[in-house]
Image (cartoon, rainbow, N blue to C red):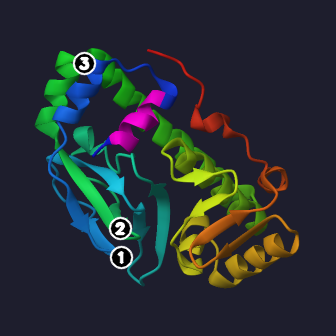
Amino acid sequence: MIDRHIARIRVRHRLDAVEEQAIRSVIGSARDVPARQTFIEAGTRLDHSILILDGLAARYKDLRDGQRQITALHVPGDFADLHSFTLKRLDHSLIALTDCRTAPVPHARIAELVEQFPRIGRLYWFSTNLDASMHREWVLSMGIRDALARIAHLFCELQVRLQLVGLGDADGYTLDLSQAELGECCGLTSVHVNRSLRRLREMGVLTFRAGRVAITDAAALQRIAEFDPGYLYLHPDPL
């Protein structure tokens, strides 16, 4: 049930059989969340964290006039809110952008896990730091990258992250997002997203159609985005 989460950890860290079984033992029963449903509201008191087993989820913040900013995307294998273990209340909401299967992990069980296996505690500390690293890259995109580079960078990042859990390859991946949702990820209007997608297609770099990202020139896409995967910390570095 949580093989993608284990695979995500193993990309970066050694994990022995005892540690793996310990992680598997704290995962609760799977729950389904329909697409476009907010499953955690900002400010809600939390006693568990949510692991994404399948589907695409997001963190977001919004304004009273209904404008929404997506601040992070979560793919299968990700904890959507591991930071709630210490924060207890989130300053943002969590939404299922597609049909999702999730699993709650009680904070009490996490506490027992990290007390019994301190190294696993460091692995999950690393995970929250990795989330912060990705967040900084998103801030950089919205701060100084132009519209074309923002879109290109997001597609590059998702290709890497989905490949890690067996859901993407060199040719592309499934991404069931609307152009409006892409705009909310990148701080762009739907008009700018549409123009950028058309330009990438005309350049022979990438097409995004019917929920499928088809990459025809990965090197060119990475050049447009100035994509450096270093912020994803992909090198094995056992703790």
Q: Is residue 217 left or right of residue 172?
A: right
Where residue 116 sits in the image (x, y, percent)? 17, 17
* Tag 1–tag 3 contact (CB < 8 Å): no
Where residue 120 sits in the image (x, y, percent)? 31, 22
* Tag 3–tag 2 contact (CB < 8 Å): no
Give whichever of discs 1 and 3 has the lower sequence position: 3
Label 2 environment density (alpha carbons within 10 Å; few <14, some 14–19, many ≥20): many
Q: Badge 1 is on which residue?
A: 36
Circle nearer the viewer, 3 or 2: 3
The Cα atoms of the two marked residues, 1 and 3, are separated by 37 Å
- Magenta-highlighted stretch: main secondary structure? helix
Going by the numbered disc 2, the residue's amino acid type is Ala
Q: Magenta segment, which residues?
A: 3-10
Give whichever of discs 2 and 1 has the lower sequence position: 1
Q: Which element type, helix, strand or loop, lies under badge 1?
A: loop
Number of dots carrying numbers: 3
Residue positioned 80% across, 70% down in the render: 200
Residue 18 badge: 3
Q: Which element type, helix, strand or loop, lies under badge 3?
A: helix
Asked if residue 56 is positioned above or below residue 110 in the image, the reply reads below
Residue 174 badge: none
Where residue 190 sits in the image (x, y, percent)? 63, 82
Q: Is residue 74 left or right of residue 189?
A: left
Circle nearer the viewer, 1 or 3: 3
Asked if residue 44 is positioned above or below residue 14 in the image, the reply reads below
Label 1 environment density (alpha carbons within 10 Å; few <14, some 14–19, many ≥20): some
The Cα atoms of the two marked residues, 2 and 1, are separated by 5 Å
Where residue 64 sits in the image (x, y, percent)? 38, 80
Magenta includes 4? Answer: yes
Q: Badge 2 is on which residue?
A: 96
Give whichever of discs 3 and 2 has the lower sequence position: 3
Instruction: Between residue 173 and residue 126, name the one nearer to us.
Output: 173
